[in-house]
Every structure is written in C-alpha cells, then in structure tokens.
Image (cartoon, coloured by chain):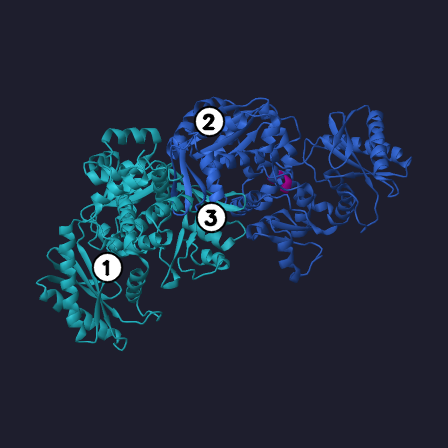
Chain colours: A cyan, B blue
Amino acid sequence: MASYEQILKRVLIKIKPSEKEEKRIKELSNRILAIANEEAAKYEGKAILAGSLTRDTWLPNKNEIDVFILFPKTFSKEKLEEVGLKLGKIIVERLQGKWKVEYAQHPYIRGVINKIQVDLVPCYHLSPGEKIISAVDRTQFHVDYLNKKLPEKLSDDVRLLKQLLKANGLYGADSKTSGFSGYLCELLIINYGSFIDLLKSACQWKVKEIIDIENLWKQQDYHHLKKKFKDEILIVIDPVDKERNVASPLSVEVFYKFKKIANQFIKSPDESIFFKQKEAKLTPSEFDKYLKNRGTEIIAVVFKPPKIVPDILWPQLRKATKRLEAILREYEFVTLRSDCWTDEKNLAVIILEMQVGELPKIDKIKGPLVFDEKNANNFAKKHEKDAITGPFIEDVYWFVEVNRKWTTAKTKLIDSLSEKEKILMDKGIPNYIAKQIAGGFKILSEDGLKKLLNNKEFAIFMKKYFEKENLFI
Amino acid sequence: MASYEQILKRVLIKIKPSEKEEKRIKELSNRILAIANEEAAKYEGKAILAGSLTRDTWLPNKNEIDVFILFPKTFSKEKLEEVGLKLGKIIVERLQGKWKVEYAQHPYIRGVINKIQVDLVPCYHLSPGEKIISAVDRTQFHVDYLNKKLPEKLSDDVRLLKQLLKANGLYGADSKTSGFSGYLCELLIINYGSFIDLLKSACQWKVKEIIDIENLWKQQDYHHLKKKFKDEILIVIDPVDKERNVASPLSVEVFYKFKKIANQFIKSPDESIFFKQKEAKLTPSEFDKYLKNRGTEIIAVVFKPPKIVPDILWPQLRKATKRLEAILREYEFVTLRSDCWTDEKNLAVIILEMQVGELPKIDKIKGPLVFDEKNANNFAKKHEKDAITGPFIEDVYWFVEVNRKWTTAKTKLIDSLSEKEKILMDKGIPNYIAKQIAGGFKILSEDGLKKLLNNKEFAIFMKKYFEKENLFI
C-alpha cells in the first residue's frame, strides 16, 4: 500500500494548475485589480481580490475571479449601489469585456473577460473588528484573516481537500450541494494543520462537532453553541465573527458522506477517491427489476423547470415535492419515498414512490362528536345526497360512507395540479414551480419513466435513488 | 289514518298477558314469596318481589321472577352470602325446583320452578334514605318508589313502551343491547304521564337531555350534571339516588334509534312498529355486489365463543375487535370498518373490512434523530443484516429499507393470532377470547364468508353491516 504522502504527491501533480494557466489568470487578475483600484480611487474606494486566487488554493480550469470594491462608510446604501454598478460597468468595458447586472443581497456587475467570469462586488470599507453592515462586508475580514493565518505551505493541502470534495459532490455551499464552501475548507486546514490530519480527525467527528480555531468561546459555552446552532451538524466558528457558523450550509448527509470518505481514505488510501468516478446509469431492465422487488408504484410529475438561479430552483423543487407528498397523504395516499431532480434547463422531475397508491371505491368520512348537535346537523345536511351509508355512529362520532372521488394517487395528483398558478400557490407549491406547472405538466407512470432513462443524468439519479448509499460508517 | 288511541288499543290486546298466564304466574310468585318469607323470618329477614310483576307492567311469556331477601344490617357480608345461598337452596327445594349458584356482584341462587326462572337475591334491609352497602340494596328503594309513584292506570303505557323497545332491539340494559332497563321505562312513563307524551317529547330530545322527576337538582346544576355524566347521551336521575343516572347503560346509537322510532310513530302511527319485523338476510350474490361496489377486502376471524355470560362475552368480543384493528394499523394495514357478531354458543366472528390490506414488499423504517448518535449506532447495528438500502438520511432522521415481513393484512393477522393464550392477552386480547383463539381459529376471506351466510342470524347481521341505517333524523 502506497503511503499517504506518495498518493497525495501523485494527486497534486494532476490537480495543480499549470504554470501557463497560473500566469494567465494572475496577469488578468492583476490587470483587473489595477484598473479597479484606479476607478475606485475616484470615490475614495479600494479594490481587493477575494476567493482562492489570493491564497493560491485554486484548482485548474479556474474561470471565476471575485473582486470586492470597498467604499467609505459615509456612502448611503443607495450611493454604494449606484457607484458600485457604475464603476463595475466602466471597469469591464475598459477591459473589453461584456457585463450584466446580477442580484445577490445587492445588485452587482458580472463581467466576462477573456472567457473568465469576473464579479465586481461593492461593499463598505471597514476597520478590523468593526460591525458589518451587509453580509458582503465580511469578505474583507476573511481575506485579511486568511492572509495572516494560512501559510503558503498549506495551499496544497487546501487544494487536496477541495479536489476530494469536488470529486465526491460535496464542494460548494449552494442549495443543491449543501456542501463545503472554499472558506470552510481553508479554515479546516488551518485548524488541523494538514489534509491528512483533517481526514484523521473527521473520522472521529461526533455530530455537532465544534471547531473554534481562535478559541472565541470557552469550553463551558459549547452547550450553548449546540443549542444556538441547533439544526446544524457541524459547527465551525467564523474567526472574524464568533456568532456565525461557517459550516451552517452543510447538510447532515454531506457531513456523513465526508466522514465516510475520510474513513475510506485513511483506512485504504487510494488516488481514485480524488477523481470523479464514472457513474452508473439505471437501465430500463434494472428499473423493472427494482419495481418488482419493491412492489411499489412510481409516479413522476414532469415539467419544464423555471429559468431561475439553481439556488432558488432546487429549494423550490424540493418544497414542491414535500407539498405533493402532503397533499396525497391528506387523501390517504401514502408515499414510501420521494425525490426530485432537474437538469436546471429542460427537465424537472418529481418522483413519488407510493406505499398506498390505490384505495377502495368507498370512503368513510368522520364527522363531529355525537354531543355536538349543531355540527352534526351540518354534517348530515352536507352529506344528505352523497352518503351511501349513514350517518351512523362509531364510538362517539358521526360517520358517513361516500363514493371516493379519487381512488388512485395518480388521478388525485392530476386533479391537484390541473390548476391556475395562483391556486397551486395557495396549495403551497412555491411560486416559480407553480407557474411552470400551471403552464403544463405530465404525469408519468412506469413506462413513461423508463423512456426518460434515455436522459443520462436522470438515469444516474435514478440509479442512486434505488441504491441509496449506506451513510453509516 | 288511525288515531294513536285506536292503534295503541289494538296493540294492547295483543301484548297484554292472558288471564290464564296472569293467574298462573301470580299464584307462583305468591307461593314463592310466602315460603321465602317463612324461611327468611328465621333470620329476622323478609322477602319482597321486584321487577315488573309488582307493578303489573310485564309482557306475555314472562318466565322470570325476581325475589329479594332482605336481611338485618347487623349481618356481616360473609354471613349475608352464606345465609342467602342456604335459604335460596331451601326455598327452591321446598318448591320442587332445581337450583344453581349464579354470580353477579355477589353469589345468589337461581332456581327453575315450573319452567319459570326464579332469582333469589340476598341484600340488606335498609330504612328509606339510608346509604346502600351493595348495588343490590337499591332495589328495595326502587320497589317502594314505584309502588308509590306509578299509578295502576299507567301500567299499560309502560307495557306499550317495553313492547316497542323490544320489537326494535332496544330493550335491556345488558352489554349487547345497551338499551332501556325496565326501571328506566317506568320512570320515563311516570315523568311524561303517558306513552304518547313520552314519544312526542323524545322527538324533541336534545343530546344529554336531563330528566329529573323529583327535581333533586336545580336548573343551575344541569351544567354540572352534563359534566358529571360526560360520556352519557341521556341523563335520567334516579329518584332514590340523585348521584345516579338510570340511563347510563344507554348507547348513543340506541338513543338516536329511539328518537327515530318515536318520530316515525308520531308522524305516521302504525301498529307494525310494535312487532318485530322479519329481518332480511344477506344473499351471497348481494355480498359479491357490495364488495365490488365498495372495492374493499373483508377478512374474518372465526372461532368458538367462550362459555361465559353474554354480559362478559360481548364487551370482550368488541374489545378484541378493536385490538385487532389497532394491531393491523401498527403494521400500516388500515381498516375501513370493523364489527363483530356471535350466536353466544357456537360461532364468534370478527369482521375486518380493509381500506389498505396489502402493502409493498419493501418497508421503510424510521430510526432515531441524526443528532442522537448512541441510538443511531444501535439502529444501524440492528439493521446491519436486513437493510436493503441505507441507513440513509431524510430530513433529520435515519432510515433503512427492509423487506416487509407481512405484505398482507391476512398473513399479519394469522401471525398475530397464532400464539398462546398468555401472549394474546399481552397483546390486549381479553382473557376469555384469548383462550378460545389460542385453542383454534380460522381466517376467512370472501369465499369462506359467503359460505357462512348459511347461518341465518349471521346473514341478517351482515345485511345490517352493509346497509348501515341512517340514524340521523
């Protein structure tokens, strides 16, 4: 078995940017920074580079540069926005690039220069320790902190960590991934001192592990911290803001997946774990086999995804899935499992695997307490025409039996979704998804889904759906 | 339309005992009373007649006589029992009858003399208003009260009421019927002054109607009374004990059924309502039709009923039915309706009509919170071998999928019931029923049940099961 060092060395050869790429991107970023500073100076402002470029922890094929333009605190919010956008446009134009306005917490300019995406984000220039005004103001502190605390010799360890996470789908604090941000990677390496020591420690991580590099909290505060971050599985105190958990976007699944990968590498180190493996697709015959063995019915709602950023699309799609499950359950159709998937462009799919997808023709409806005469009267009147049996009494409640309106989950789904946008939203379907579904959707059963397996990414998703990984180490 | 009076007169001709029967039973009861008094005198005791015979409110084919033997309060409970049994035996033997010991709250002698059943119940002799020691002591007060308050001219009204209730299955405070006791009938007639006025009033009865003949409570106590008798639908204060509701055995269904019958008679008086109508049996082809239209599956548990008095048998059978429903629901099999029936001799049947009688081959098991590491470990270990997928995470819980052990309600039922008496009792099946089921049971599906429709009484029961009456007027 090769030693950790040998393997990591071999990996690094593959994942360190080439001198050519390094030269190209550093030249570009220096040029941007020079021009940005020139323009910013006109407003007593100053430009800084943020992100991995500043710390040499970036991976090859880097095509994003983040520049923050710091303006005096005396600027009003309006002025900051206005000047920020104005300068952003000027800077991109001076570099012969193209720009558009993007929106995060505030609008900012995104340019494309020599095929590299450049974000020019305006914020306030603060002194160390000063209270931030907007979340983007925090970045300057992060840059300062890392400049001081992340020694150059640890750059490669950060690179290894990022590469490992990327290959395994755990890199990125975006909604889809719910994984590790670049800053979190850098903090973890600072804390443990090396990639290998991080991995060894991660094997031992307990749930709600607390990492507080600068000891901003005392041991006796830990109980309080776990309560403060009560839904979060890993707590990494931001060295520049002790009230903030840098690991807060991390999902429980990503936490366990990372522990599992750490374990795997520490026990049997192998280079392959650093590189994305070819993922198997579900074949139509495997699909048949799974359905037969599970004895379930799968219903899929298929529609064109809304054109919104993935960070809004994914949470909305997930929420829509949960809502459909809940609506079906109201009508006594029970799902065994559900999931959703989208290519973020042409296809969105909500999967509902039914435990109870069909019900008898008859439905027993529970009425009021027999002691509640007024409501009993209303109940009897309401069901005067549709009651097949009753009103009758069981224990102390009135009941009637009526013909069930929807005897299959599929027909109920079609009924619930065949509505205008507004009504879908009233049912709890998030706005963008509601609009798309109101514009048209399809309900697919087994056969339709089997055809959809032609879509490679969907077939990979379905394979994982059925072969849900054991996350318990 | 015939007038109420005309109809009631015609009914009375049919339901008044013949002079011959009256003479025969009065002679017998006088003879018993004389001998009982003779024997009781030896212990400073005294015998009284109780029940309908004393008030001439009995119906033809009467074959029961109740005699209470009142002993001095100075007797210990043990002595009361001992002397009571001893005298009971002597009395029956002196009348050339056969006796056996029966058990209610205390043991007593039941004799059969000239085909008439004679109960000889010992109790304490109390002064009016004195606190009773055992429930049987109350009877002497009831006898006294009715002797004073029920005028002879109302006897026929009581008879009409009893006959109406009997014909419609509402007469008797026993567990099976949960209906009107004889004493309750007498009190209702005293209160309303006539059969017709009772029926007219019953049409207007609200739930938790309060009838307090002797005004033992004030109007402002009524709220308290409704709370005191919170599960009871009709409140008839016992004139000899204001803390007691004579109507407490009345079920909600009997209450509404009585209101319905009262309405029917008052609106369109007809003699036929006083006589038991021929009840329709469910035919096998009707059975098929109902199942098809309802789309349900019916499973029946069939066994020999235990040899116990109906007042224990019926509650146990009902409780067993509820328990089986609950056990199935634990395993995600949902019943739409359930019921039970027995001929009290050879056949007991528990009917379970399934809403969800079949489930997928796969079962998703919910584990502990992801934050609960200790239990998560146990959960993972427990399912190490049987987990088909997982442990995986959904929201903040661990889950595994395993092969479902019972995919049909029928197999689960067979599994749950194929146990020793003791284990069945641990599962909440009442003791006598548990013993019988442990001794053998059958699970019938549609075909088996269709054959069972050969049993006339069962076929009548099943007809009512499917055509559940509208009890709402």
Q: Secondary structure at mark 2?
A: helix
Question: Gap between marks 3 and 2, in whole Å?
Answer: 32 Å
Q: Position of residue A437 (x, y in %)?
A: 23, 50
Looking at the rendered image, the quarter that the N terminus of chain A falls into is top left
Q: Which mark is residue A367?
A: 3
Q: Residue at x 75, y 33 (%)?
A: B65
Q: Which mark is residue B411?
A: 2
Q: Judge if badges 2 and 1 mark residues of a common chain.
A: no
2 vs 1, front mark: 1
Q: What residue does disc 1 label?
A: A54
Q: Judge if badges 3 and 2 mark residues of a common chain.
A: no
Q: Position of residue A282 (x, y in %)?
A: 25, 34
Q: In the rendered view, would you say A373 is above or below A350?
A: below
Query: Which of the chains bears the disc numbered 2?
Result: B
Q: Which mark is residue A328?
A: none
Tell me if I can see residue A356 in this picture: no
